[in-house]
Image (cartoon, helix red, strand yellow):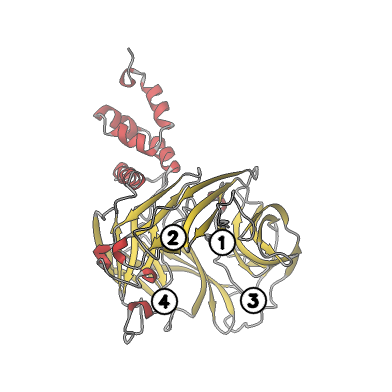
Amino acid sequence: MTTFNHLPTELRREIAMHCTLESVVRLSQTSATLRALILSDKHILSDAFKMYPLDLPAGTTLDRSPSRYLALCLKAARTKERLWSADITKALSPLHHTSVPLPEIVHDDDVAGLHECPIPQPPFIFDDIIVYWADQGPFSLIIADLTDEERRLDIDTEQIASLNCQVRDGNTTLRIAHVSWDGCYVPIVEDYDITGDYFRELLHFRAPPIEGRGVLDPLIEGETIFIANGSSVYMFNVRDETGVQLQLDGVFKILRIRAHPDMQSLIVEHVDVDLHSHVHIAVISIPHSTSKLLINRPDLESTGLWPIEVVSPIRKLSYSDDLMPALPLPPDEQIFSMIALAGPQPSSHSDILEVVQYSSQAASLYQVKHMAISPSSWDITSRVIQAPVLSHRPNTRVLRLQGIQMRYSDFATIFLVGERSGYGLYVLRTEKSGEMGWILLDISAVFGNVREHFDDNIWGFDVSSGRLFLYDRDELHVLYY
């Protein structure tokens, strides 16, 4: 009988090319021969990586893989297996716990209770690099390395209304796009080199002021930045210094924007002027040419400096927010409400759009519905999962409705907390395939078992690395599960 080891090398390599990350890692641990086979062709690990991506160290890519590439993949596979196979009836304890001082996280030292402290915005996490900003004056934007206290940059800024980050240029450059209030709302783009001993600014781009009614987080698509605001999308190119304001006809408010995978159009989720209870998914064409802008002019205060183009969205489908039942109703008539939408998504990660809804029963979570939408065919795959039994954890509620960051998939994550920290923290993981599952995390290492009012101290859960981020006064706590 022929075994895998007896197959020709080329055939074994071809089989390995179609394996999941977990299977490739297991093969590498089977024998020295199979380990050598996997390491002999970087495409084997790279193809498996694309199925379950993880953050790579700064300066490394799939083409310039890190020296410990296989070890990183092994760690990711073990983390996924541990989280995916966790017993929901027993809280998963962290493998280890670290804390990092963040002295600028809270500026009011006289606040008595933690639950009364100013709540910092959730950070952006890229491997060991964290980007966060103070939401209370004095305002600042901070880039820090979680493994090196000396590697940190504090940037004075005005109050930030919205912000998004992206690591680009072969994982060497951090691009930060944000809208700040400086007497008017101003889009700003900054690039930083993250590969050296310190973070070094490479670019500072200041666009003309924009209207400030409900500014969403910027969408970064290469050199082009999109900022949704009310019923308009501001689009500008950092390299060409050109831009345009796209006014969407008949739209009341834009909820989320995505770059279509073909990069010829934008996917826009919005509500109309005449019906706010239904969310529409539509597309608008991206203009091929735009006009020159007046840039890097702090003296400009007028929002009338953008050329305007009125566009009509092409509607593809709609779904109800909360007024129409999404499933056959239980006796007390369950109604599904839309979970707050995740952030903007670039074209390389928009092959699946995710919408998550939930229903409640007696003030507790009852069911969660996950819809995966294909922007090429506009087909919808829908699945429903029951909430965990929470009778022994009173006052459990939906806390936060997304994970740390949406780089590869939405990974929409719901946190459920009870009235005391000893009840643990429920997390719902979702995948592009529509698979869902609950995880129960033990957080007593930070908050003990009786702490109340701890929900605002939860920053988020990074599914790909199994890291939970919590803050306590001026410290960031990282729990590794």
Above or below, 136 relative to 127: below
- The first of marks 1 and 2 along the sequence is 2
Quote the CA–CA distance across marks 2 and 4.
22 Å
Of residue 296 and residue 321, the one placed in the foreground of this image is 321
Image location of residue 77, percent across then percent down = 34, 43
Image location of residue 276, percent across then percent down = 67, 65
Residue matched to label 4: 134
Three-letter residue code for mark 4? Ala
Residue matched to label 2: 173
Residue matched to label 3: 211
Three-letter residue code for mark 3? Glu
Residue placed at 53% from the left, 57% from the top? 359
Q: Quadrant of residue 51?
A: top left
Three-letter residue code for mark 1? Leu
- The first of marks 4 and 3 along the sequence is 4
Task: Name the front one of labels 2 and 4.
Answer: 4
